[in-house]
Image (spheres, grey):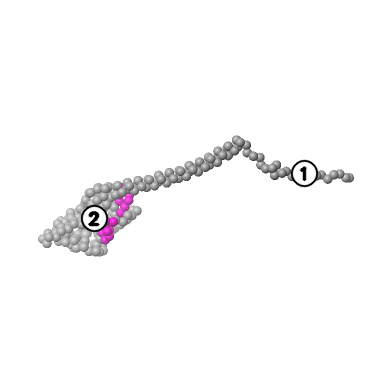
């Protein structure tokens, strides 16, 4: 049996296999989608910048507000000795512009933490019956410019004993106070009292806490 061999079909040209081109309407939609994507990215970028600016401004406002209500508790030690008379006092005064809460106070004399002023009087060798003015201080809120004399005496012998105790580098007062924003500082009479150390929260002095 004979016959002509089947001729191979012609392969489609590159132009024939090319994907059909987009219609005008489809091209418009593609352009719109592209612009929407670009605008979305621009919107996200602007939103990030706005958020950063808002956070920065908020932090600046908080810093300004905190500075405006900054408390500063000073330790004041006053004494005199004329030879015939002598006096001594320790006071705390809030020299800042907003209230300050004294959370904790520690007084060490001769390496011992004092429980109260009566303990301090006997530790320095004073007469327990001597006339001494005392006020509590731990946990107290001091208004701006408010001063509290925590101990004062005009008994010459006791005043001189306290003067000697204050002059000793081994004795110190440590206290911590906070602002209404719970920003806290620790001041140590052995350091520069004009530059108290910022802390996250006031330490717990425990049994060493000095209250009244």
Q: In this view, does 212 lie to the left or right of 63?
A: left
Name the image quarter holding the C terminus: bottom left
Q: Which residue is drawn at 83% across and 45% down?
A: 5
The answer, for residue 169, to whether it is visible in the render is: yes
Nearest the eye: 91 or 60: 60
Could you tell me which residue is drawn at 21 percent across and 51 percent down? 148
Q: How crowded is mark 1: few (under 14 residues within 10 Å), some or many (20 or more)?
A: few
Q: Where is residue 124 in the image (x, y as percent from the top left)?
A: 20, 62
Look at the image and say whether residue 191 sits in the magenta stretch: yes
* Residue occupied by mark 2: 75
Left/right placement of residue 136 relative to residue 26 reads: left
Q: Which mark is residue 9?
A: 1
Residue 117, numbered label: none
- Horizontal and vertical percent for residue 161? 18, 62
Q: Examine the rendering and report whether any part of residue 174 can be seen.
A: no
Q: Where is residue 7 in the image (x, y as percent from the top left)?
A: 80, 44
154 within the magenta span: no
Residue occupying image coordinates x 23% and y 53%: 92
Residue 162: quadrant of the picture:
bottom left
Q: Which of 65 and 180 is in front in this view?
A: 65
**How many numbered tags mark residues here?**
2
**Residue 149, percent across and down?**
20, 53
Q: What stretch is highlighted in magenta?
A: 178-195
Question: Could you tell which of marks 1 and 2 lies nearer the N-terminus?
Answer: 1
Q: In which quarter of the image is the N terminus?
A: top right
Spatial CA span between label 1 and label 2: 106 Å
Q: What element carries label 1?
A: loop
Does residue 204 sit above or below 43 in this rendering? below
Name the residue at the left extreme: 84
- Mark 2 nearby-residue class (10 Å; few <14, some 14–19, many ≥20): many
| Up/down of 196 relative to 43, above or below | below
């Amino acid at each position: 049996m004979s016959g002509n061999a089947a001729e191979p079909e012609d392969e489609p040209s590159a132009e024939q296999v090319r994907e059909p081109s987009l219609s005008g309407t489809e091209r418009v939609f593609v352009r719109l989608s592209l612009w929407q994507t670009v605008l979305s990215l621009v919107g996200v970028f602007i939103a990030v910048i706005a958020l950063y600016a808002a956070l920065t401004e908020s932090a600046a406002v908080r810093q300004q507000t905190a500075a405006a209500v900054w408390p500063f508790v000073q330790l004041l030690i006053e004494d005199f000795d004329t030879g015939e008379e002598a006096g001594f006092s320790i006071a705390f005064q809030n020299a800042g512009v907003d209230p300050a809460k004294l959370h904790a106070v520690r007084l060490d004399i001769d390496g011992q933490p004092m429980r109260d002023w009566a303990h301090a009087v006997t530790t320095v060798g004073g007469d327990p019956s001597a006339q001494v003015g005392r006020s509590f201080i731990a946990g107290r809120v001091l208004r701006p410019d408010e001063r509290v004399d925590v101990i004062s005496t005009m008994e010459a012998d006791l005043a001189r004993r306290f003067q000697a105790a204050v002059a000793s580098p081994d004795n110190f007062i440590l206290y911590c106070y906070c602002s209404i924003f719970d920003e806290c500082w620790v001041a140590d009479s052995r350091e520069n009292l004009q530059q108290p150390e910022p802390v996250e929260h006031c330490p717990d002095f425990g049994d060493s806490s000095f209250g009244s």
